[in-house]
Image (cartoon, rainbow, N blue to C red):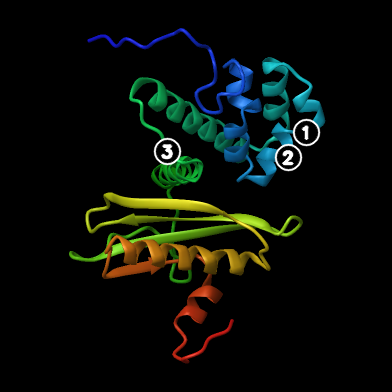
Amino acid sequence: MSRRVPLETQDCVLCANAVETTIHLCRDCPFTKLVLQNNGVVAQTCFSPEALGSDLVGWLKICVQSLSQTNLGELFYLLWGVWKERNSRVWDEKSCQLWDVFLKTSTRLRDFHFHNQPSVKLNSRSRLERWKAPAFGLYKINVDGSFNHVTRKGSCGFLVRDSIGTMIAAGGKPLFGLLSAEHAEAMACGFAFGVALEQNLVPAIVETDSLLVQQQLCRSEDSNWW
């Protein structure tokens, strides 16, 4: 089986503002920059003055030397997500929004870590939290929010899966004017609630990793201004 793709242009299919080169796709493309900036540590290294002044090989050396193994792995995984989106636009003429690319890639990375984590001996005082599918007829919505205390910006996203673990829906968006990490997490919950109701993904269970947000959402008072 063969596919025919027109090669009349070498413009980047993600931004259409520059010729597509390897360093452009991995570092300089505005689309890639926005994806990588969701990890503050990765972005600080990838877009430092020294890194921006380097060629592809020099840039990779700086990333390898400066990032921890975990953050370096996330960098390459995010770049894989960008490359996958690029190929989808070229070969399948399908495109996803920026935040969907980041959320889907991050979700795959979490799944990879989950399935490749070392075995842990548990005692009565500790247990390993694992994602569990909801009962038949229910959806489970996992939400997450990020927060930068310097810029007061962040992002939020959610993932909906059914009782056999199949991804039904996902979404994400940037956030501005945040007050705290809990604020970002609460905004993520509100965003997920709205989409779930619009798409009739109910009844559903919502999971958040913020105990404070969970406690506030479960309060019985009519008015909860927290």
Which amino acid is tagged 3? Cys
Disc 1 is placed on an element classified as loop
Who's the residue at 60% across and 45% down the image? 38
Q: Is residue 148 above or below residue 99?
A: below
Residue at the left extreme of this rendering: 136
Residue 61's disc is none
CB atoms of marks 2 and 1 within 8 Å: yes
Who's the residue at 27% across and 68% down the image? 202
Q: Position of residue 190 (x, y in %)?
A: 47, 68
Viewer-side residue, 61 vs 217: 217
Q: Considering only order in the chain, which callout, 3 or 2, is on the residue closer to the N terminus? A: 2
The label nearer to you, 1 versus 3, is 3
Residue 44's disc is 2
Residue at the bottom extreme of this rendering: 221
Instruction: Return the residue at label 1.
Output: 48
Image-quadrant location for residue 112: top left
Residue at the right extreme of this rendering: 49
Q: Considering only order in the chain, which callout, 3 or 1, is on the residue closer to the N terminus? A: 1
Point out the image quarter for the N terminus: top left
Residue 96's disc is 3
Who's the residue at 67% across and 17% down the image? 56
Alpha carbon distance from label 2 to label 1? 6 Å
